[in-house]
């Protein structure tokens, strides 16, 4: 079997830089596809954190002007896999996040920053740089989406895959940015980069890519509809069978309760009884009352997508039913205030931490009884998968990847020993309160609860099957090219 060389183009990847699930996926993908004959190189923007991890690196190439600013291509490692970094100080060496300043305001020149990143990645993928050759380019989300477009308008025959991790983020800009992108005039067309009179980055990538994937089969169906397609449903429908749903796995090197250095007490399927030490530690860490009643956790961006406004409404009910809640989140200021107020109303029962804390998120999955994920839409979702792996029973809304990865504890599933969590029908006060009531009732039956935990821990949330699915897709596209 010939090894396929794939360039994975991503704006974030663990362990170097992360704001959400995209980073987990981009970080895990090289190892996931390696057993299936794919040698993957990842290309990232040179943010300060990425450059710091790279150390002293040799420049493989220099662009005198990448959409107006000089840039260099540096080589390094992402774990054990090859990494390329676009070092363009004017674009990427900034304090704050990858997309926004420290105050949370999006950088005004994101179109140029990620246009330049995609331009560089397209050059690399197409073999313009000596010593680097690829069979396929795989672009993730709007930040990388112009790469397939640049390849297309350069006349490259290189096959490409465009993965949608979240349709809600599309990279829309005014028509005035078009000239600076350095594309031929014909690209500003309805089947090109033009979108409602402006430029749409994700749209451009979806038009140009040889195939489209998204991160669960249910989300792949949902984005064909107006409710989830966010304006691109027509385009997704028109690309028909070229749209695939491949569910994310989790990186079991980072997320393994038997070997997790963040935990007070490691545990596994056969040592589930030891898990309680993590619950005690979590109660202490959050200042919650300590007892055997149900402890819910939430680890999330605080946004409308994640249904956090509805959770806020349901907290009093949750506490009234004997539940406790530990929440780790960051985002919307009004929601943060709402959760602080709920914690003040319910001392010992509700506690919150605002901010982003990777190690704490591990301790919460290990110590919580159930993780609440009431998303309005969820392309795949990772926190419920970590919950499954850690015996923290997911309570999820029935949408996207949540519907695909959690088996509801209905009577039939319970009888078959297949139940791994609780699904709620809608993201409303009533439906979420019902799901919480059902969870608490199940938690009162220790044998049933343990069976649900065990079924979750045993379910296949590894990258095995999905790594093969990506590799098969790459192979079919390279063959057809
Ligand atoms: P999304 O990418 O939409 O934010 P996912 O569930 O796919 O949602 O991925 C979220 C990732 O970010 C998970 O790895 C989750 O553990 C992590 N995460 C989210 N919020 C926090 C936080 N406040 N602190 C630590 N980790 C977080």
Image: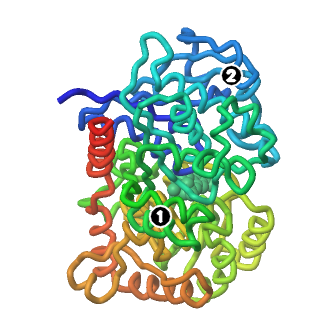
Residue at image x 43%, y 68%?
Answer: 221
Query: Whole-percent x and y of residue 359?
Result: 54, 47
Q: Report the Cα–Cα distance between label 2 and label 1.
A: 34 Å
Residue at image x 63%, y 52%?
Answer: 190
Quadrant occupied by the C terminus: top left
153 to 215, vertically: above or below? above
Query: Whole-percent x and y of residue 376?
Result: 58, 73
Q: For marks 2 and 1, give the one nearer the viewer.
A: 1
Quadrant occupied by the N terminus: top left
Which residue, given by chain and number where applicable, does mark 1 sit on? Answer: 237
Question: Element under label 2?
Answer: strand
Q: Is mark 2 within 8 Å of ligand 1?
A: no
Which residue, given by chain and number where applicable, does mark 2 sit on? Answer: 66
Camera-side residue of 294 and 64: 64
Camera-side residue of 296 and 465: 465
Is 385 left or right of 106, judged from the image as shown?
left
271 to 344, vertically: above or below? above
Furthest residue to the front?
186
Tell which circle, 2 or 1, labels the residue nearer the N-terminal end: 2
Furthest residue to the left?
1
Query: Whole-percent x and y of residue 111?
Result: 72, 39
């Amino acid at each position: 079997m010939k090894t396929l060389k794939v360039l994975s183009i991503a704006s974030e990847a663990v362990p170097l830089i992360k704001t959400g699930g995209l980073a987990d996926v981009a970080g895990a993908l090289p190892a996931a596809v390696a057993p299936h004959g794919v040698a993957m190189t990842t290309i990232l923007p040179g943010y300060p954190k990425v450059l710091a991890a790279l150390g002293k690196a040799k420049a493989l190439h220099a662009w005198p002007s990448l959409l107006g600013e000089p840039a260099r291509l540096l080589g390094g490692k992402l774990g054990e896999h090859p990494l390329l970094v676009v070092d363009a100080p004017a674009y990427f060496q900034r304090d704050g996040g990858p997309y926004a300043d420290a105050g949370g305001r999006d950088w005004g020149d994101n179109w140029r920053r990620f246009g330049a990143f995609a331009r560089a990645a397209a050059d690399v993928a197409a073999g313009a740089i000596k010593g680097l050759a690829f069979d396929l380019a795989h672009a993730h989300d709007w930040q990388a989406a112009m790469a397939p477009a640049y390849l297309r308008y350069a006349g490259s025959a290189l096959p490409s895959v465009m993965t949608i991790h979240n349709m809600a983020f599309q990279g829309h800009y005014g028509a005035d940015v078009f000239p600076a992108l350095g594309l031929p005039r014909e690209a500003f067309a309805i089947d090109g980069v033009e979108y409602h009179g402006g430029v749409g980055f994700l749209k451009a990538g979806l038009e140009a890519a040889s195939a489209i994937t998204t991160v669960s089969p249910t989300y792949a169906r949902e984005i064909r509809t107006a409710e989830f397609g966010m304006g691109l449903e027509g385009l997704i429908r028109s690309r028909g069978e070229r749209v695939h749903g491949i569910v994310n796995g989790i990186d079991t090197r980072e997320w393994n309760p038997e070997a997790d250095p963040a935990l007070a007490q490691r545990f596994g399927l056969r040592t589930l009884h030891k898990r309680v030490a993590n619950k005690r530690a979590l109660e202490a860490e959050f200042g919650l009352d300590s007892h055997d009643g149900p402890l819910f956790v939430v680890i999330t961006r605080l946004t409308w997508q994640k249904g956090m406004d509805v959770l806020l409404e349901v907290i009093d009910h949750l506490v009234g039913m004997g539940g406790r809640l530990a929440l780790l989140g960051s985002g919307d200021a009004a929601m943060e205030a709402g959760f602080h107020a709920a914690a003040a109303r319910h001392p010992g029962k509700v506690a919150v931490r605002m901010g982003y804390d990777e190690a704490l998120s591990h301790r919460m999955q290990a110590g919580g009884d159930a993780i609440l994920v009431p998303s309005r839409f969820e392309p795949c979702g990772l926190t419920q998968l970590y919950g499954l792996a850690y015996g923290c029973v997911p309570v999820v809304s029935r949408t996207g990847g949540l519907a695909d990865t959690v088996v509801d504890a209905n009577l039939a599933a319970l009888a078959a020993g297949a139940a791994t969590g609780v699904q709620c029908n809608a993201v409303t006060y009533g439906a979420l309160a019902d799901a919480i009531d059902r969870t608490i009732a199940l938690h009162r039956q220790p044998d049933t609860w343990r069976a649900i935990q065990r079924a979750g821990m045993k379910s296949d949330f590894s990258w095995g099957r999905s790594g093969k699915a990506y590799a098969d897709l790459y192979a079919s596209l390279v063959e057809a090219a």
